[in-house]
Structures are given as C-alpha cells and as structure tokens.
Image (tube, helix red, strand yellow):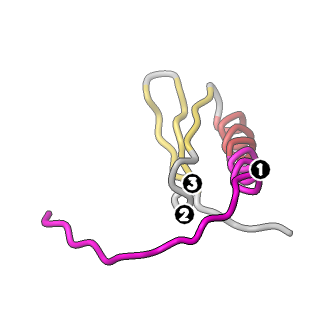
Amino acid sequence: MTQTFTLEYWKEKTWYVGRLKEVPGVFSQAKTLSELEQNIKEVYKLMQEEEASLPLHPVKTKVLAIAV
C-alpha cells in the first residue's frame, strides 16, 4: 500500500532539512533534496516498525485549550 504525505523542507546553510507535515516526529536532513526524500522515507518506515512492536494500551483523549 502506498500513502501520500507532504514533505515540508527548507535550506539551513548547506543542509536540506525536512519533515512530514502529517506525521509529527518524522524529521531528517541531508546534503541533497533527493537524499532528504530517502532519509524521510526511512525514518517513516522505522517509526512504523517501532509503533507496531509496542504493546497496545487503552488510549484516552481529552480536549485541551491553550491560549495563544
């Protein structure tokens, strides 16, 4: 199965830095945009593998108001 995500990226000096907009925590950096894309894919896959290996716990939700 293939999913589509938004890669947000920017340049910091000589590095491309990026993240997946829809998946908090998926960040990486590389010397080229192509390398950044590959790194982001690898980080996403590693996060999916890690999440699959975690024991399942009941999850609760709560609305949280934050003044900005």
Under circle 3, the secondary element is: strand
CA distance for labels 3 and 2: 6 Å
* Element type at mark 1: helix
Residue 66's image quarter? bottom left
> Which of the two residues, 46 or 2, is positioned nearer the viewer here?
46
Q: Is residue 60 magenta?
A: yes
Question: Vertically, is 34 above or below 51?
Answer: above
Question: Of label 3 and label 1, which has the lower sequence position?
Answer: 3
Picture disc at residue 20: 3
Residue at image coords 51%, 45%: 9
**Magenta residues?**
44-68
Residue at x 62%, y 29% (from the top left corner): 30
Residue, x 65% and y 37% (percent of image)?
Answer: 36
Which is the main secondary structure of the residues drawn in magenta?
A: loop
List the residue tagged with mark 2: 22
Please tell me whether residue 30 is drawn above or below residue 65 in the rendered image.
above
In the foreground, 7 or 43? 43
- In the rendered structure, find residue 49 and report the number of the disc placed on it: 1
Is residue 48 shown in magenta? yes
- Residue nearer the viewer, 12 or 41: 41
The residue tagged with tag 2: helix, strand or loop?
loop
Q: Position of residue 49 (x, y in %)?
A: 77, 50
Which amino acid is tagged 1? Glu
- Report the quarter where the N terminus lies: bottom right
